[in-house]
Image: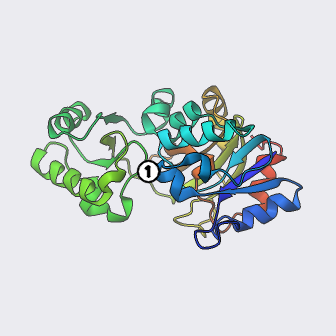
Amino acid sequence: MLLIVPGDPLRPRRPDDHFAPEAHAARDLGVSVAVVDHDALARGDDVPRAVSRVTAEGDAVYRGWMLRSERYAAFAAALAGRGVTLRTNGEQYRRAHELPGWYPDLADLTPRTTWTVGTRRADFDRARCDLGGGPAVLRDFAKSMKHHWHEAALIPDLGDGDAAWAVASRFLDLRGDDVVGGFVLRRFERFVTAEVRTWWVDGGCVLVGAHPDSPHDTPPENVDPRLLGPSIAALRLPFVTVDLALRADGVWRIVELGDGQVSDRPVTIAPEALVGALFAGPAVA
């Protein structure tokens, strides 16, 4: 088994500092580590060169920065040409990384959602009306701008078309060329806990911890990922994260599902714990 991580932009033979602890943990477990040029992969130029430092063959897992789905597919293809098979293939990555890929199977467990293909206002207005009135949260297929909550994420009232479009326009300004797919509108639900990040390998939960945005918020004792087990296993995705939060009525809800390869690890989860669970550890649910 092989762990692939981004190389340091200034020292390309070494792992990027952000992923170096996981690379060290992997080596301590006897797992080989290789580095790739993430910036070249993200641009989509000269992908074979971007993976040229991967010399080992066999099965591999990537732990690194996000890639657009089409860039990930090209990455996987270039590795395949070198005898390396990513545990998560291109189609599986898209299903996990982009909300329309996983939402239909988990619709009962997550806020009601509509989306557009593209970013035209006419399509946005149709999606807005389909969701109905009241507040909503805006994002694209892969990412929100939650750190710009009031200007580019929260829509206070879907019934006010001009005000809603002002939020969408600001979202487009901030995301720029990084917009993925189109607009996604999620019914606003009031949560009373910080998000909890759960990690799943081959349909089983292997870790439960804090979310990277609130790494020191210990997950409540009553969070039980086993309740989600059948639903997550049915997705048949090899490595994902599922972020949960407790709704005001006492129901745990899925806030986000993402590909585990590009999900950030909070500092309060030891790299040894994640790498060990990924390559060797038994599921806890």
Relative to 133, 25 lies left or right: right
Q: Residue at x 50, y 47 (%)?
A: 250
Residue 275: quadrant of the picture: bottom right
Residue 200 image point, x, y percent? 68, 42
Q: Residue at x 55, y 42 (%)?
A: 72
Q: Which residue is mark 1?
A: 248
Give the residue displayed 61% in from the left and 36% down from the top.
Answer: 77
* Residue 251 seen from this side: no
Q: Nearer the viewer, residue 44 or 182?
A: 44
Q: Quadrant of the N terminus?
A: top right
The number of callouts visible is: 1
- In the image, 177 versus 253, the foreground residue is 177
User: Residue 24, relative to residue 87: is it above or below?
Assistant: below
Q: Nearer the viewer, residue 170 or 257?
A: 170
| Residue 151 percent across, percent down from the top left | 24, 62
Under mark 1, the amino acid is Ala
